[in-house]
Amino acid sequence: MTLSFGVTVMPDPPSKRFVELLTLAESHGFQYGWTYDSHVLWQEGFPLLTLAAQATSTMKLGHCVTNPGTREPTVLASGYATLHDISDGRMVMGIGRGDSARRYIGQQPVKVAEFERRLAMIKDFMNGRPVEWNGKELHLKWVRPELPEIPMWVAGYGPKALAVAPDAYALRVALTVGPTAMVTHQGVRYAMPAAACGLPATLWLYPDRVKIVTAGSKHEAVHPRFPQHGTISYLPGQRAAQLATVAGTRKRLYFMRERLLELGPVGEGYLTELVHQRPHTWKGDVERLFALLEELGDAPFRHVLQRALFQRLIGAEYVVRLVARLPASPAEAAS
């Protein structure tokens, strides 16, 4: 994973210096530009971030941190959505309960339960999804769906605050779905719907899974972070859906063969024997084997293919027979 660097600039006057420091940091390769959000201790941050968005081109910008207490949640969400539009998709939200900002004006930080409720609304609302708030259905219909989702990073201390919104603690990675509807991260390839090809997306990285969401939340897929076998993860039906978008007999055959090869050494070994022993009919075998892969799923199909390879049963019809002998239920397997 590539290490990212950021810089925090206090929102002190003059505003020209604030912008100069962030543009200087961007020119030296800093990827994130942060500022504080205590509106009495320092100058108001939103106008300064607007100036910074207009003066920079690649740096991601945001508060470190804002809060949903001094700022009414719908106003805060709308402010970030507006800045996301101005910056062409470069905003990131750091948010906490409002310690310095609220205590300085005689208020307490937002209570944890209410904090969590507001976070859930803000995250959806600023990213263009409809919400229900104060008994009203609300929707920022002007949010640009092609922009990547605004990440929300939560700051907190103590057991109650640190238990808030586990989704908010996922590492987020901005990326683009590849031309074969695959997303690659840390050497693992994750399949997306075929219609997601070429779209900007955000990968949410958890200890046990990844969630990939395209801009505007039009497409989403959740995969195990580490596939059980190999370095490629498909969800049920994804291969068939991707195949449906492939035009041309040769391209379709290539697609199916590549999916079988992705099974690892067993797939490579079986296809090698298949092409060697059946030079004139292997293409039809590949089609039948691909259909079985889709029907059974990776792990059961890999097990059957390994057994066929071990017994030198080379041909789709033999694999079909082995599949027919599989137990239909856990009870049958135990008997």
Image: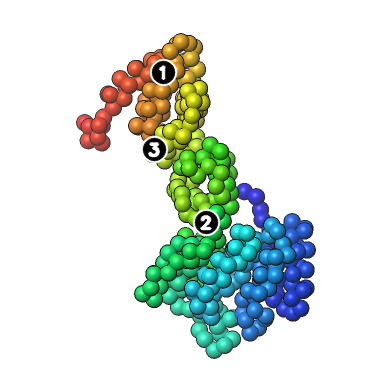
Image quarter for residue 111?
bottom left
Question: Nearest the camera: 28 or 280?
Answer: 280
* Quadrant placement of the C terminus: top left
Which residue lies at the image location 74% right of the left edge and 69% below the top edge? Answer: 19
Q: Which mark is residue 74?
A: none
The kind of residue tagged 1 is Gly
Q: Which mark is residue 284?
A: 1
Q: Is residue 151 above or below residue 186?
A: below
Q: Identify residue for label 2.
A: 145
- Name the element at disc 1: helix
- Name the element at disc 2: loop
Residue 28, percent across and down?
77, 58
The kind of residue tagged 2 is Pro
Mark toward the start of the polypeptide (2 vs 1): 2
**Left or right: 60, with 113 as reference point:** right
Q: Nearer the viewer, mark 3 or mark 2?
A: 2
Mark toward the start of the polypeptide (3 vs 1): 3
- Name the element at disc 3: loop
Which residue lies at the image location 48% right of the left edge and 66% below the top edge? Answer: 140
Residue 78, percent across and down?
53, 70
